[in-house]
Image (cartoon, helix red, strand yellow):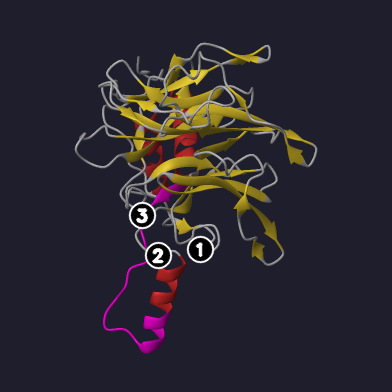
Amino acid sequence: MSRVTGSVLAAFLVCGLVPFPLRAASSQPPEIFAPGIISGPAAEDSAAFAPDGQTVFFDRIRWPNAAILVSHRTATGWSTPEIAPFSGRWLDHDPAMSPDGSFLVFTSNRPDRPGSKALDAVMANGKVAPGSGGHLWRVDRKGNGWGEPVRLPDAVNASSRTYAPSVVADGSVYFQAPGADGDFRLYRSQYRGGSYQAPVEVRLGDEAAHKLDPAVAPDESFIVFDANYADKDQPDRLQIAFREGDHWGTPADLGNEVNKGSPWGSHLGPDHRTLYFSSTRGVPVHYPRSEAQGHRDVARMDAWDNGLDNLWSISLAPWIEAHAHGVERTRQAGIVPVLPR
């Protein structure tokens, strides 16, 4: 199959013109992000970049020890991460930057009212996980600093397990929260007139499957998330879906090269085409090895490569371009895509 023909076929699959999902292949494997500095000896996720790409917020976590950290790009690389000025006292994680950099939304177990205890997580079966709850909070940029975090309204934080925000261009927020069956689904809260509206469930493929960790393009043209479409007893896999009119198109699996090491926690880079995610993957070790290679392998293990979640990145260009080719081919052929409902 030629490269052009393969891209067109892949795009038709994304558009839902044939009854099976796209399985595009990236030209490059994922790359570790800032090894030994940002991807370090603990576990990291949720890389949230400032629009200029010179600052990144992320969380470092060994549950229940967590905080949101910040690092800045310098002439010699990324700076040693420090606790963000609005974090450190509570179990803060899942930072998500607004596309214009004016505010950041994150998850926290901090009490809803000052002076109260940390938020508990109430499970579907009624059991309580003390201090493990999560509500969404917003912190606005104030000059060169940050203001005080403000909790999003009850309409958004209806569950004590509200996590993984993603902010789009108009300020609306996507996030995950338990559905009626207690399993996680994705929701969208429209930001209108300075307030967040009642959330609406985001329909993506099999409604019985759980969906987690949305990463949404600022213009809402596509969404990346993880889901267990194939088997609830198997690890989640990263998926991408494109907007098709007033519906989301059929989700497409990002393939086996991306879906190694239980990937999750998708975020988009400042170019909105690079995907950052967490994974337990590492660098293969081959035996026998030289003495010098042995020292390098152990040093890498000390720095980051120890089986914990670290931050990885990959370009989404193959999937975005395949979709664009498919849309154009469909337009030229006068075919009306069959959209999922």
Which residue is denoted by mark 3 in the rendering?
280
Q: Relative to residue 154, is residue 305 depicted above or below?
A: below
**In this orientation, does residue 148 appear?**
yes
**Is 338 included in the stretch rendered in magenta?**
no
Mark 3: secondary structure: loop
Which residue is denoted by mark 2 in the rendering?
305
User: Where are the magenta residues, as a range?
Assistant: 276-295
Q: Residue at x 68, y 67 (%)?
A: 76
Q: CA distance from mark 1 to mark 3?
A: 13 Å
First reached walking from the N terminus: tag 3 or tag 2: 3
Q: Amino acid at mark 1?
A: Pro
Which residue is denoted by mark 1 in the rendering?
35
Q: Quick check: marks 2 and 1 in contact, CB under 8 Å?
A: yes
Picture coordinates of residue 177, whole percent (x, y): 40, 24
Mark 1: secondary structure: loop
On-image quarter of the C terminus? top left
Q: Report the residue that reaches farthest toward the front.
A: 115
In the picture, the disc for residue 281 is: none
Q: Amino acid at mark 2?
A: Asp
Picture coordinates of residue 314, whole percent (x, y): 47, 51
Q: Amino acid at mark 3?
A: Thr
Q: Residue at x 46, y 41 (%)?
A: 266
Front residue of 62/35: it is 62
First reached walking from the N terminus: tag 2 or tag 1: 1
First reached walking from the N terminus: tag 1 or tag 3: 1
**Is 285 included in the stretch rendered in magenta?**
yes
Front residue of 327/260: it is 260
